[in-house]
Amino acid sequence: MSWPLASSTLRQRTAVAVADPVLRRNVGNAVERFRAGKADAYASIHDPDGLRRAARGVRGDVLSRWAEVLERLADNVLAAGGHVCWAPDADAANAYIAGVARRIGARTAVKSKSMATEETGLNEALAAAGCSVTETDLGEWIIQLAGEHPSHIIIPAVHRNRHQIAETFQAAAGMPEPVTEPEALTAFARAELRRRFLEADLGITGVNLGVAETGSVVLVTNEGNGRMVTALPRVHVAVMGAERVVDTWEQADLILGLLSKAATGQALTTYTSITTGPRRPGEADGPEEFHLVILDNGRSDLAGSEFAEMLNCIRCGACLNVCPVYRQTGGHAYGWVYSGPMGAVLTPLLAAGAGDHAAEVANASSLCGACMEACPVEIPLQDLLLSLRRRKAAAAPAAERAAWRAWAAAWSRPPAYRGSAWLATRARRLAPLAARLPGGRRWTASRTVPAVAARTFTERWKAGEV
Amino acid sequence: MNREAGDRAAFLGRIRHRQGPPVTVGPHPAPPPPAVVPEVRYRALDGGPDLLTVFAEAAARAAAQVHLGDPAAAVAAIVAAHDIRRAVVSREPEAQALGPLLTARGVDVAAYDPATAAAADLGVTSAIAAVAATGSVVVDAGTAGSRGAGVLPAVHLCAVPRIRIVATPSDVLRRGPRPLPSNRVLVTGPSRTGDIEQIITLGVHGPVAVHVLVLDDA
């Protein structure tokens, strides 16, 4: 599903989200479960913080040699008999994959979750090329049927309960009986999607990690759809964000050793699948062609910038699970592909074409820093969010900037600071009138105006009262 | 056919132009990369316990069933528990050896192909290794001759010699056999999802049950 940044404002989307009790209960339960799982998983290994620090160092090292590592990956994919496409942007990636679909006469495709292809809107591009795409990750299929976007990168349909899912299956997938037990719903999905796996001409996946040393792509899943998509259709296309690479298997091992523990609390997900080229002679299944599409789409702009460490992200979702903002709103409030703290950083950077609407997503944060603590590669998300907000403030209207400058000037000088504090105490009964100032009502609608004291601290100190 | 599309030089040029060491933006500077990339050390392996014991516990936590001892008895139990009528067997000798045991239980045994596997109740493979810390088995498409034998049927039976049990995933990912096959997968229990109200449901697209038969012969 094509994904331009939502044209609503952050405030509008948030208001919708916090008014939805099903969403908030489901999101609350889900993130609690994941947090508990992660804590248990980290408790089962030695020195997780040391490993996280090393992982941050590893990702930084790889990205400081990013071009060389990508080149090695591409050469080894080719050596293993695969195809490589260098896609500078969404259109290039979609055009290449649509071209593959047309060449092989693909009428249907099955996809194992790929956030990068949600970014590019691949499904629509393939539909235009006469190839219909079925999402096969259960949560992604549910929201595809419902015509929605994911609201969590690991559990995309977290905002829907069993009754809503059953309704969707009945309305859009032809489920005959109104069953609502999760096992029955899953059984229906299994049967329906199995048919599509067996019929599909084209299999599309994302890439959790590309490993340059051997030209391999690693896919980390629980449901088995990733394995079906890479075993049954004639052609496998893997779409990889260009930054999702490591150089060596030592590095890959460390990252994979942290990824599922941070994401879901599993030591490993059910399937850690390593694909190196297409099927080999004598094998009874597997794709005849393997294609790796390397997608830039704004990522290279971050290299060497103050936001470069955002490229370290391994898309585990741990930051979503600890974020006090995400917990209350779920993913749709962020308005784009990526949500939670990582979405609050990526949206202003990658969806930059959308201007203000993208920039304001960086406000969806209390800067509490829980995200960095949770991140398995120690991305300083709150520092990046502060940088984005600094950037946004520098582009604010002249009047606003002048007001902040005046305030900063006043409060940097002791006489002006003491004078304004004295004035505030003497004018304290006027404080509720703040709501009447321009922008004041919005400011005070969700904040309590502080009760100002009758005299300043300096006065009381001089009087010996404190 | 030229297997490379797009402009490699332009793509990498954009990156080379900008790449560099991490830029510090706040009070959390990036550490230097480690001289040696550390391995994850699992507490379950502290003190050097018996790997089979650790494997069995980890596999059980992942909802896989582990069988020791007589293969015939294990096969009989599995066939009965899941009402197995048809099985596909992959190419490894350890998997092939179970064919006659299945036939003796009245199971229709065939070589793997996708259509046959999709209609089968049981898929039998071996593994190039088993991982004690996580309870995983490692299946190579080259050795098995396919990717789908352990994933299409509802039940997966994996017969792995005890001597192939290694301690951690690092033993496979860093030190596993090379060159890599077209596909190598670490399988940790049956397929599952939490997508419906975060209730874990087994048997989504892959198997609903995984049985690991640990073989005593070297």
Image: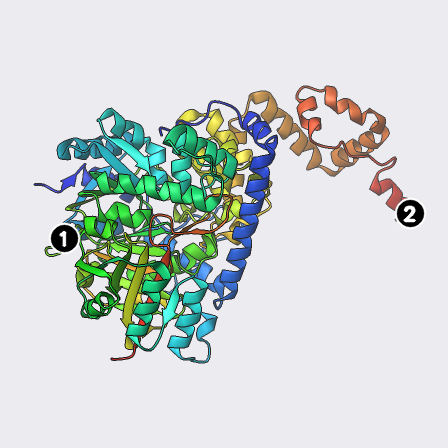
At mark 2, the secondary structure is loop
Residue A46 in the image: x percent, y percent? Answer: 48, 68
Tell which of A377 and B52 is nearer to you: B52
Return the residue found at the far left.
B1
At mark 1, the secondary structure is helix
Q: Chain of mark 1?
A: A
Image-based side of B66 in relation to A329, left or right:
left
Image-based side of A360 in relation to B141, left or right:
right
Residue A306 in the image: x percent, y percent? Answer: 44, 43
Q: Which corner quadrant holds the N terminus of chain B?
A: top left
Residue B84 in the image: x percent, y percent? Answer: 30, 59
Question: Residue at 20% across / 38% down in the picture?
Answer: A201
Image-based side of A432 in relation to A3, left or right:
right
Residue A465, label in figure: 2
Tell which of A303 and A245 is nearer to you: A245
Is residue A16 depicted above or below A370 in this figure?
above
Task: Classify residue A452 by image quadrant.
Answer: top right
Question: Residue at 84% across / 38% down in the picture?
Answer: A456
Residue A40, label in figure: none
Other-residue count near label 2 (Cα within 10 Å), few / some / many at <14 / 14–19 / ≥20: few
- Specify the amino acid type for callout 1: Ala
Q: Chain of mark 2?
A: A
Question: Residue at 17% across / 43% down in the picture?
Answer: A234
Tell which of A15 and B84 is nearer to you: B84
Other-residue count near label 1 (Cα within 10 Å), few / some / many at <14 / 14–19 / ≥20: some
Do circles 1 and 2 both sit on a common chain?
yes
Is residue A182 depicted above or below B83 in this figure?
above
Which residue in the structure is indicated by mark 1?
A: A79
Residue A225 in view (yes/no) = yes
- Specify the amino acid type for callout 2: Glu
